Amino acid sequence: MIGEIRADLKKGVPITVVSTSLVEAGVDLDFSAVFRQMAGLDNILQSAGRCNREGKLQKG
């Protein structure tokens, strides 16, 4: 699945990913928006690291 997600992101295909916390800390993905359900601050910070990770967006 991660390979498919990366391929879609690279092509610019709009996708929505619903995942476990594994994607927060264990996988290098870059999304234009990230939404996180209530969690501890460390989990929220990990989620934030998936948003505009590569700096492709002018504003984030």
Image (cartoon, helix red, strand yellow):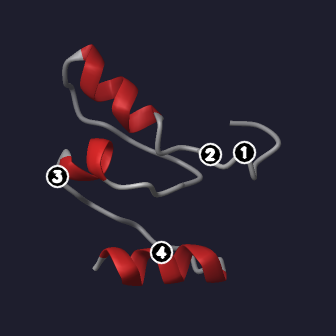
- Pointer 1: residues within 10 angstroms few (<14), some, or many (20+)? few
Q: Residue at x 59, y 52 (%)?
A: 32
Q: CA distance from mark 3 to mark 2?
A: 19 Å
Query: Label 1 vs label 3: CA separation?
Result: 24 Å
Do the numbered discs 1 and 2 sit on residues whose CB atoms are within 8 Å? yes
Q: Is residue 59 left or right of residue 35?
A: right
Location of mark 4 (residue) = 6
Report the amino acid beneath label 4.
Arg
What element does badge 4 sit on? Answer: helix
How far apart are the two marked residues, 4 and 2, measured between alpha carbons?
14 Å
The residue under label 2 is: 52
- Is the residue under label 1 in contact with that under label 4 (CB below 8 Å)? no
Q: Residue at x 61, y 77 (%)?
A: 10
Q: Residue 45's spot in the image, x, y percent?
A: 38, 25
Give me the C-alpha separation between circle 4 and circle 1: 16 Å
User: Gap between marks 1 and 2, in whole Å?
Assistant: 5 Å
Residue matched to label 3: 20
- The amino acid on which the numbered mark 2 sits, given as a three-letter code, is Asn
Q: Position of residue 19 (x, y in %)?
A: 22, 57
Could you say which is closer to the camera, residue 28 or residue 12? Answer: 28
Foreground mark, 3 or 4, reads 4
Q: Residue at x 21, y 26 (%)?
A: 38
- Please state if 18 lies on the left or on the right of 47 as rendered: left
Q: Earlier in the sequence, mark 3 or mark 2?
A: 3
